[in-house]
């Protein structure tokens, strides 16, 4: 045998895409697991030509699912961000777009039984401990993928997926404001370090002499900006208690500007070494929280709503994303209760994915492998 077959679903979740596996079909050891995921995606080549990645960070993401041992959750969702070219795998973050496909994938894999109508799937994000309630349309007990819901960054329409994120404040660092401050000066740039669904370092676009309306191509070509941003991100990561983040994708980075297309605020989100073509689901929750919190770098960029829940519409390079935020504001102290979004997902392929047996011969997997997903 020269290759090892691994059952998988290939799915688009939100504005990201990647393989969805059963965790039990992969090696338990994180080192072996990383090698397998690098081979599966084809990391190490800008086009991921020897794997199923797509040459962009939003297409080199991996979801691994298992029945949850948590009393609240139905499914455990373990996420991995595989780099495009550096053969690195980061198990620290989670991804809300890929999470959009977890409910449908869990049903397709037989981890959750579908109901007739709508199936509620309670998901525990293993990487961060976050709890997410996903509502999947399942008429006749089958996942529905067609529908009339459009999300910016994805062509066409599909069935809506409701996601409600619970207990997301301090998901990675233990505090909404990991440094204890609403603003910090880092490398001459004023930032807000915030942890709501995703730890982020957030600045005003004009602090970097940007408008905040640049295209992804314009930003990615601005190497001087990325050098300045990365220096600030690394220093802020230490201040947030995350240690040396030079090889980690967290904290992510974002810049804010006033809305100009009828939204609440404009933003650009970085992954962090290139520009997100749309907006991350987890990042949108953190940016929305920053926008709603008095005293942050968002001050003066928007008219803050004072009633909860409220919808924060974030303008991004491909359009907008709406975040329904349930919050409390007492004496200007912001408390995030939950954040909800509507995404879509689609099953693209199902079968076996192959990795060279020299990388992994399958011996660490259970003796009885799961059926190929149909």
Image (cartoon, rainbow, N blue to C red):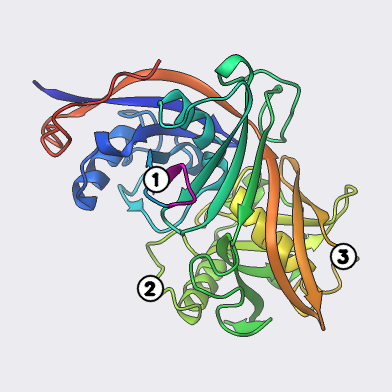
- Of the 4 image quadrants, the one containing the C terminus is top left
Above or below 235: residue 45: above
User: What is the x, y in percent for residue 187?
Assistant: 57, 82
Quarter of the image for residue 150 reads: top right
> Most prominent secondary structure in the magenta stretch?
loop
**Which residue sits at x=43%, y=39%?**
60
User: Is 151 drawn above or below residue 237 in the view shown?
Assistant: above
Q: Residues within 10 Å of mark 2 (few under 14, many from 20)?
A: few
Which type of secondary structure does the marked residue at label 3 adopt?
loop
Left or right: where does residue 53 sit relative to residue 99?
left
Say which residue label 1 marks.
68
358 displayed left or right of 121: left
Q: Is residue 210 visible?
A: no
Residue in front for this viewpoint, 231 or 342: 342
Residue 335 drawn at (x, y percent): 71, 72
Q: Please state which of the two labelled residues, at mark 3 or mark 1, is closer to the viewer.
A: 1
Circles 2 and 1, Cβ within 8 Å, touching? The answer is no
Q: Residue at x 66, y 18 (%)?
A: 146
For disc 2, the marked residue is 244
Residue ranking furthest to the front: 71
Q: Magenta segment, which residues?
A: 71-76
């Amino acid at each position: 045998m020269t290759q090892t077959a691994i059952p998988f679903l290939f799915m688009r979740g939100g504005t990201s895409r990647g393989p969805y596996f059963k965790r039990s079909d992969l090696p338990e050891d994180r080192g072996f697991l990383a090698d397998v995921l690098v081979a599966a995606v084809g990391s190490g080549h800008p086009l991921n030509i020897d794997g199923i990645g797509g040459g962009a960070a939003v297409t080199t993401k991996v979801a691994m699912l298992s029945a949850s041992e948590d009393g609240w959750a139905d499914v455990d969702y373990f996420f991995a961000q595989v780099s495009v070219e550096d053969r690195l795998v980061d198990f620290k973050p989670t991804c809300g777009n890929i999470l959009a496909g977890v409910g449908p994938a869990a049903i397709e894999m037989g981890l959750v039984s579908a109901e007739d109508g709508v199936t509620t799937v309670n998901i525990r994000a293993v990487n961060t401990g976050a709890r997410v309630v996903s509502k999947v349309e399942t008429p006749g007990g089958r996942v529905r993928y067609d529908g009339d819901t459009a999300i910016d960054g994805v062509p066409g329409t599909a069935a809506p997926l409701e996601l409600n994120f619970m207990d997301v404040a301090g998901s990675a660092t233990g505090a909404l404001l990991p440094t204890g401050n609403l603003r910090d000066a880092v490398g001459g740039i004023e930032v807000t370090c915030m942890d709501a669904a995703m730890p982020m370092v957030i600045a005003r676009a004009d602090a970097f002499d940007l408008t905040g309306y640049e295209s992804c191509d314009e930003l990615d070509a601005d190497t001087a900006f990325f050098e300045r941003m990365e220096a600030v991100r690394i220093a802020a990561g230490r201040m947030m208690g995350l240690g040396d983040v030079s090889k980690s994708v967290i904290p992510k980075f974002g810049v804010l500007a006033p809305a100009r297309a009828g939204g609440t605020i404009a933003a650009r989100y970085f992954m962090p070494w290139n520009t997100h073509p749309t907006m991350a689901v987890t990042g949108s929750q953190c940016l929305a929280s920053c926008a709603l919190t008095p005293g942050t770098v968002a001050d003066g960029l928007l008219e803050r709503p004072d009633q909860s829940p409220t919808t924060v519409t974030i303008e991004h390079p491909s359009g907008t994303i709406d975040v329904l935020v349930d919050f409390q504001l007492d004496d200007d102290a912001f408390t995030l209760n939950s954040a909800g979004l509507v995404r879509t997902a689609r099953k693209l392929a199902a079968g076996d994915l192959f990795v060279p047996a020299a990388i992994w011969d399958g011996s660490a997997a259970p003796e009885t492998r799961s059926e190929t997903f149909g």
